[in-house]
Image (spheres, rainbow, N blue to C red):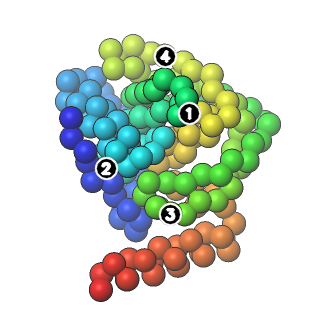
């Protein structure tokens, strides 16, 4: 397995929509394994293929706590098929926008349909952190970032800080 380069804003690939996977091949499984390795190395709890420059509808996540066994989930072509009307607020961050977090409002409960690595359809009912993580990663596949869900003022503050960090790193 390989640790891949995580793309950071303002990389344009983060704003592109990923394409569905037509067939689950060994190459797709290899990409998912590399994405998992990259996510754990970062460290993070979720990663979408866009974030490593691959425009395929692939996500990996592991929302387990430190005192739980790892629970790696790999999703191919994830699609939310139900969203509750109840809303939750959780603090979100992003490996593509390091060191910045904000409270994001999302549906509390979702149902997501996807293909597993065997190419079989699965459905997961998710709530809490897992629900937010799935929605966050599917947003990535659609070219949407968590900062798109917060107020313009908060988003502008984060983006100004990111631009300043980029300028300082280029010196």
The residue positioned 22% from the left and 23% from the top of the image is 25
85, 64: nearer the viewer:
64
121, 153: nearer the viewer:
153
| Element under disc 2 | helix
Q: Which quadrant of the structure image shows residue 38?
A: top left
Q: Which quadrant of the structure image shows residue 129?
A: top right
| Element under disc 1 | loop
Binning the other alpha carbons within 10 Å of mark 1 as few (below 14), some (14 to 19) or many (20 upward) gives few
Q: Nearer the viewer, mark 4 or mark 2?
A: 2
Contact between labelled residues 2 and 1, with CB atoms less than 8 Å apart: no
Q: Which residue is mark 3?
A: 99
Q: Which residue is mark 2?
A: 52
The residue positioned 48% from the left and 23% from the top of the image is 69
Residue 145: x %, y % from top left = 52, 56
Q: Nearer the viewer, mark 1 or mark 4?
A: 1
Q: Which residue is mark 1?
A: 65
| Comes first in the chain, label 1 or label 2 | 2
Q: Quadrant of the C terminus?
A: bottom left
Binning the other alpha carbons within 10 Å of mark 4 as few (below 14), some (14 to 19) or many (20 upward) gives few
| Element under disc 4 | strand
| Comes first in the chain, label 3 or label 4 | 3
The residue positioned 27% from the left and 37% from the top of the image is 34
| Separation of residues labelled 3 and 4 (CA atoms) | 34 Å
Any part of residue 57 in sight = no
Q: Which quadrant of the structure image shows residue 150?
A: bottom right
Residue 33: x %, y % from top left = 28, 31
Contact between labelled residues 4 and 3, with CB atoms less than 8 Å apart: no
| Separation of residues labelled 3 and 2 (CA atoms) | 18 Å
Binning the other alpha carbons within 10 Å of mark 2 as few (below 14), some (14 to 19) or many (20 upward) gives many
Q: Which residue is mark 4?
A: 122
In this picture, residue 55 sits left or right of residue 78:
left
Binning the other alpha carbons within 10 Å of mark 3 as few (below 14), some (14 to 19) or many (20 upward) gives few
């Amino acid at each position: 397995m390989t640790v891949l380069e995580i793309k950071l804003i303002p990389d344009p690939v983060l704003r592109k929509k990923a394409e569905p996977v037509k067939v689950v091949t060994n190459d797709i499984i290899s990409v998912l394994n590399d994405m998992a390795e990259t996510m754990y190395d970062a460290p993070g709890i979720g990663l979408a293929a866009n974030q490593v420059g691959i425009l395929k509808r692939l996500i990996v996540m592991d929302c387990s706590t430190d005192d739980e066994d790892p629970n790696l989930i790999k999703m191919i072509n994830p699609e939310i098929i139900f969203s509750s009307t109840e809303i939750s607020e959780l603090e979100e961050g992003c490996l593509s926008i390091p060191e910045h977090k904000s409270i994001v409002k999302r549906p509390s409960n979702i149902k997501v349909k996807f293909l597993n690595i065997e190419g079989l359809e699965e459905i997961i009912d998710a709530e809490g952190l897992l629900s937010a993580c799935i929605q966050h990663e599917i947003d990535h596949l659609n070219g949407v970032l968590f900062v798109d869900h917060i107020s313009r003022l908060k988003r502008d503050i984060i983006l100004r800080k990111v631009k300043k960090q980029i300028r300082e790193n280029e010196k």
